[in-house]
Image (cartoon, grey):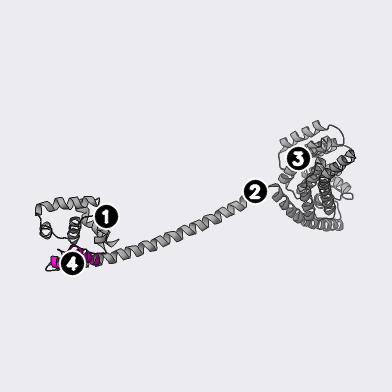
Amino acid sequence: MKASCKIIVLLLFLAPLYGRAADARSYYEEGKALREKGKQVAAMRAFIRATHCETDNESLLGRVYSNMANMCRQADDHQTAFEVYQLSAQHFAKSYDSLAYAYALNNMAWEQAAMGHEQHALSLVDSAVTCYPYLPLTEKVIETKAAACFFAQEYDSVLYYTASSHDSDYLLMLRAQAFSFLQMDDSATFYAKQLLPRMTNPFYLDDLYYILTHNDLSAQKDTLLKWSSERADVQKLIKERHGQLALSIHLLQQDLHPQKQNLSIWFILLIVSGLVLLIWLIYVAYQQYLLHAEKAKFEQARIQELNANKQLLLESEDIRQELAWNDFEALCREINKRFFNLATKLQDMDMNEQDIRMCILVLIGLSHKETAEMLNCSPKSIGKLKDLTAHKLGVSGGQLQDKLLKKAIL
């Protein structure tokens, strides 16, 4: 009974894992079927879903990435194909499938050759042979070496690698193209005619049709028209497939490099935030400018009013009577009314009665003699009294009038 319980618990634990593995396989099979039907975008979506499933089947993931890389190769996006073949190789290495791993290395080598990195390609080919030095990898390795030479425009070397009697269709096509580039037209058309009836890959058919329509000088006119028409159909098919494959690769690149997309979004957000901040700063600066202009206008109006009051007092026949000088409270009321509560402001600064009287006389602009008469003291002592009052406001005697002016208008 206990053993049965343990088995049930184990099955319950493994069931979700099996389900996720089954999902990965079903997506993989779905992707393959969609590829055969020519639905490249839907196929890529299925393969991407397969890679997102949690599964321990490394070999399955390796095959998923191989299919995705093949689609990139067909779209001539060799850099992305190389990156995806790398992922394929990593999963095959984890599954200890040496043949599949060697194939992945060989495919990486082919993509490097297509990008013009011949030495890197040959280095990867050597690694593949070291990993699995047996058939059927050997034939694929020869194809890759021939391709590396072809992309490097070493056409004599291409003929060397394609001289075997067991050449694949791809090797024969490279041989025909090498003869064409070497301007050996008869040999080029010979191999092209051999391959044309049995070649089904539209990407290779286009190359063969090109050779036949440009190199076969003995072909009849109607035959050339037929080949040109067929080639136009093939090119149309290739264009349509390339369009679908381009969309598929865009989906794949978003999945492989999500951080780039995120960085782009953050970059856009940063720019937008910067523009918003700049607009806000301009708005704040404009508001400050308006506030400063309004304040300056207000201060100018107060200065004009204050100067007008000062002038009235200076022209008064009896300032003492005008300001009720003997009555300090009445004096403060008059000063507050004429000079914007200056007396109250000075009282708040703990200035005594004598200091306030001195400040008022200095602000009005009376001479030392007139000031002495108003304060009932010696003219000689006015300078010292003025300096003492100014010191309490943190300025010198010469700066006292300007200080009082600012104190009054603000």
Mark 3 neighbour density, 10 Å: few (under 14) some (14–19) many (20 or more): many
Q: Is residue 368 above or below residue 25?
A: below
Q: Measured from the top left, where is residue 32 in percent x and y? A: 84, 50
Q: Which residue is mark 3?
A: 108
| Label 3 – label 2 distance at C-alpha | 23 Å
Q: Residue at horizontal 24%, vertical 58%?
A: 404
Q: Which residue is mark 1?
A: 349
Q: Earlier in the sequence, mark 3 or mark 2?
A: 3
Q: Which residue is mark 2?
A: 260
Query: Which amino acid type is marked by label 2?
Result: Lys
Q: Is residue 100 above or below residue 305?
A: above
| Label 4 – label 1 distance at C-alpha | 27 Å
The answer to the question of whether label 2 and label 4 lie on touching residues, with beta carbons closer than 8 A, is no
Query: Which amino acid type is marked by label 1?
Result: Met
Which stretch appears magenta? Answer: 310-338
Judged left or right of residue 222, residue 121 is left
Q: Which residue is mark 4?
A: 311
Q: Measured from the top left, where is residue 318 in percent x and y? A: 12, 67
- Magenta stretch: residue 279 in it? no
Q: Earlier in the sequence, mark 3 or mark 1?
A: 3
Query: Which amino acid type is marked by label 3?
Result: Met
